[in-house]
Each structure stands twice: as C-alpha cells, then as structure tokens.
C-alpha cells in the first residue's frame, strides 16, 4: 500500500460492500486490532494468538484463507475506522473447503457481517474450484444454523462432545458449489434476499 493510499484510508486489497463493510486479508496486526477481542466474545474457548498466527502463516502457503471485516466511517466511501468486527477462514483440502472459523463481535451481530464474510469465503472456494464445502457448528448455535442453511449447508452427521468435550457439533456439507444454481443462491445472498 502506498503512503497516499494509507493516508486516504484505502487499501487495494480491500473489498467493500454496499453498506460500508470492508473485507481484507487477515494480518498478524489484526489480532490485537479486534480479532482476539471478537474471538473471546464469540466462543467459550477462543482461539489463541498462537493458533491465529499459525493459520495466517498457512494462508501464505495457500492452504488457508482468512478475512477480517471492518466498517467504513461515513458510509461506503469513508476511511476504514475502528477495530475488526468480524473474521472468517477456510482450510483447503483437495477439491473441498472447510470453514474453520466465523466470528462477529456482539455489537455487530445481525447486521450482515457474517453473511458478507460467508459470501467472500464461498467466492474464494469457487475461485479455487472447490466442489463442496463443510463446517462444524455447535448444536446450540441456532443463529449460525440459520445462516449456514441459507448458504445451502445441510446436516450430515454429529461429532459427539466435539466442543470442549462437552457440546456436540453438527457436521454440515454443501455440495455442487460450482453449479449455476449455487451461483444464483450467492447472488441472492449478496443482495440480502
């Protein structure tokens, strides 16, 4: 990024949506600028700094993909301001993608942040020609279940006591993401329908 772009609050790697949400590749400096705080609010057992650093290193090799979300001040054309309010990631294995993490700060929940992050993850999985993607979700996370269902995920199994050796996880899969039907689904989600 040039000095001028930094002064203007622009980064050529950033992508902004219509409501001023800016997504950018996760960097180590983002950990102290909102990612760890969001993670602590999102999960009973949050990922550590060391886990995130390892994932960011693996993203450099292409086996992972992580994004952060921030708001632009003054709407869609203002400077990026404040800490990260959400983050998400993928792990690539063969022709499949695995959602490793989706977290949104409590102050930004139900505002489209998770949906925007998931659309970006889907776009990356498709760009890498993945034919399917998968994830695990807590049985108790009903809001997450609803979000994932909108993206075409369906339950495929249960991992007993997966979370902290206490709570079960529902394994969900979404297949045929390279098809035209899935492209239409993503377009509708982009438009928030």
Image (cartoon, rainbow, N blue to C red):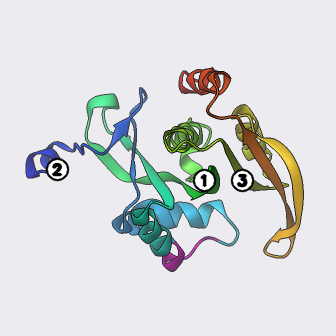
Q: Secondary structure at mark 1?
A: strand
User: Counting residues from the N terminus, which is met first, the one under dot 2 or under dot 1?
Assistant: 2
Q: Which mark is residue 70?
A: none
Looking at the rendered structure, which numbered label has been put on residue 135?
Answer: 3
Task: Find residue 20 and report its horizontal and vertical position in percent.
Answer: 39, 33
Given the current orientation, which residue lies at the most extreme front position? Answer: 94
Residue 101 rendering spot, x and y as whole percentages: 61, 58
Real-space CA distance between mark 1 and mark 3, rounded to the nearest whole angstrom: 10 Å
Q: Is residue 44 above or below residue 137?
A: below
Question: Which residue is farthest left?
Answer: 4
* Residues rendered magenta in the picture: 46-51
Taking the spot 32% from the left edge, 43% from the top edge, the residue there is 14
Q: Position of residue 122 (x, y in %)?
A: 57, 40
Side of 156 where 58 appears, left or right = left
x and y, in percent, of residue 160 in the image: 90, 67
In this rendering, the count of numbered labels is: 3
The dot on residue 102 is 1
Could you tell which of marks 1 and 3 lies nearer the N-terminus?
A: 1
Q: Which residue is mark 2?
A: 6
């Amino acid at each position: 990024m040039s000095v001028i772009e930094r002064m203007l609050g622009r980064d050529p790697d950033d992508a902004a949506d219509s409501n001023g949400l800016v997504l950018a590749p996760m960097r180590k400096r983002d950990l102290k600028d909102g990612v760890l705080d969001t993670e602590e609010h999102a999960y009973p057992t949050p990922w550590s700094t060391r886990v995130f650093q390892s994932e960011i290193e693996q993203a450099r090799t292409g086996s992972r993909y992580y994004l952060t979300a921030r708001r632009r001040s003054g709407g869609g054309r203002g400077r990026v301001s404040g800490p990260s309010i959400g983050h998400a990631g993928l792990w690539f294995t063969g022709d499949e993608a695995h959602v490793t993490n989706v977290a949104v700060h409590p102050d930004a929940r139900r505002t489209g942040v998770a949906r925007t992050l998931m659309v970006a993850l889907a776009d990356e999985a498709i760009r890498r020609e993945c034919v399917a993607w998968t994830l695990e979700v807590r049985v108790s996370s009903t809001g997450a279940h609803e979000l994932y269902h909108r993206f075409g995920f369906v339950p495929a199994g249960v991992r007993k006591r997966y979370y902290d050796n206490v709570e079960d996880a529902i394994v969900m899969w979404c297949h045929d993401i390279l098809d035209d039907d899935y492209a239409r689904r993503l377009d509708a989600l982009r438009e928030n329908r």
